[in-house]
Image: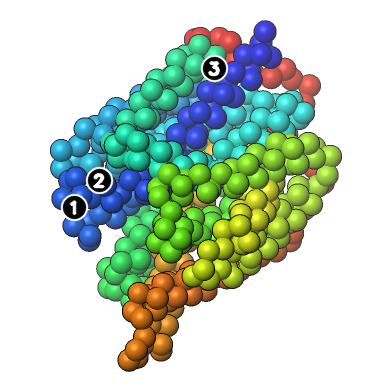
Amino acid sequence: MADNRRWWALVVIALAQLMVVLDMTIVNIALPSAQADLNMSDGNRQWVITAYTLAFGGLLLLGGRVADLVGRRTTFMVGLLGFAAASALGGAATGSGMLFGARALQGVFAALLAPSALSLLATTFTDPKDRGKAFGVFGAIVGAGAAIGLLAGGVLTEYLDWRWCLYVNVPIALVAFAGAWTLLAPGERHPDARLDVPGALLGSAGMLSLVYGFSEAESRGWGDGLVLTLLIGGVVLLAAFGVWQTRARVPLLPMSVVRDRQRVGAFLTVLLVTIGMFGVFLFLTYYMQGVLGYSPLKTGVAYLPITAGMIVGSTQIAARLLNRVPPRTLMVPGLLVAAGALALIAQVGVEPAYASHILPGMLMLGLGMGTAMMTSVSLATGSVAPRDSGAASATFNTAQQVGGSIGTALLNTIAASVTARYLTAHAGPGVNRRELAARASVHGFNVATWWAMGALLLAAVVAGVVVNADRAPTPEGAAGKAPEPVDARG
């Protein structure tokens, strides 16, 4: 019975994590409808996305330490209720300011929810065999969540209303809350855990500054004074945060979390992978809708091969081999397959190329990413002291969030500059402007995708050089110990 409850607990944790990840993309397809309904300007519409990512990315480390301080289940459940309330507020928005504020609140509660979900997973599944299966499911969700969000956004926008892209979180969060109350163990409150206030201020301010700087670079340009100030300020604040963490009595980010070679390899790999991936998702959406003329629903359905590949890579390859082979023998081939997929996608033209390039590329991308991401999740949370599991989980989520912000801004800037140069070079009398614009956009997309492929190749190098463990680590203290109970209600 306890074993069955543990797997039901995985459903609850996975459901919450899926909600957090897909909310980073579910509103993308609904954004044009929301902009028209609430009379948003083109300059302000980005805040529907940025308000969420700013709060989420900037507060993750603090959220991870709160989970260690007050208990993982408590933090998880508070995050679920807060996320549901913020989603309902956003869905009922009567103006752009109300929607921006609701999205920021979603990010605040996601920063509580994401690290507590991952640390709950790590402490619930301590048996190596079950752990591999559980992390396979979780890795598939982490990797495929963005594509699922695009599909859900297309369905809800086309058949209901853009507001349902926010309202849909309410029943999901309430179901997950009921499951958490019934199935999850209370989780330990560690008496030696303290809230490092100076560290929280420095770390959160540094992350907010960096994420905001990268998000503004997309529209303002990299040479803009505000962008440079934010990026330099973020680096300085994070450097000060690092120095303080070596001196704090109970640091927000214990040095033991980042001194472990395997975890550092996992964090860097995830950072580089999301730099490449988030920009490509955005480009593919514009390519399918703007060039191929797909509807929002058809665009969402077109992403399903990535989800299928993720599930196969995570649950049928990585989960089965994780405890049998060295982690890098899964990560490196997976990342190389994903890089090959981007090389294929980068060769599309203005003529329809879904069946010849996009479809096989998506399948390869999902397969490779599912294998690599699931292994990275296991490395990031393995062999960490229980009192620091929230901090380790938050660091993993932070690497993912920062990578997505960097990738979106960097690749969009590359694509925009390449597109502008192409238009200048090929403009002239007698040239069809619409055809030229389409060719220029696709050319910019192709060049940016080659850069994204470079990020995945660099991630493969990092995984091959830094990660050197013979087997995936098991949770500290798991050997000879029964898994943490999951049927107590506390």
Image position of 49 with respect to 160: above or below: below
Q: Disc 1 or 2, which lies upstream in sequence? A: 2
Report the Cα–Cα distance between label 1 and label 2.
8 Å
Q: Earlier in the sequence, mark 3 or mark 1?
A: 1
Label 3 crowd (10 A; few <14 / some 14-19 / many >=20): many
Q: Position of residue 43 (x, y in %)?
A: 22, 61
Task: Answer whether residue 30 is visible to the viewer in this image.
Answer: yes
Q: Mark 2 against mark 3, which lies toward the viewer?
A: 2
- Which residue matches tag 3? 184
**Residue drawn at (71%, 31%) of the image:** 133
What amino acid is found at the position of numbered circle 1 in the picture?
Met
Evaluate if marks 1 and 2 touch, with contact meaning CB atoms under 8 Å apart: yes
Q: Position of residue 342 (x, y in %)?
A: 61, 63
Q: Look at the numbered disc 1 and give the secondary structure of its residue.
A: loop
70 left or right, relative to 454: left
Q: Amino acid at mark 3?
A: Leu
Q: Position of residue 88 (x, y in %)?
A: 27, 29
Determine which residue is flagged by label 2: 34
Quadrant of the rendered image containing residue 195? top left
Q: Quadrant of residue 163?
A: top left
Residue occupied by mark 1: 40
Amino acid found under the numbered disc labelled 2:
Ala
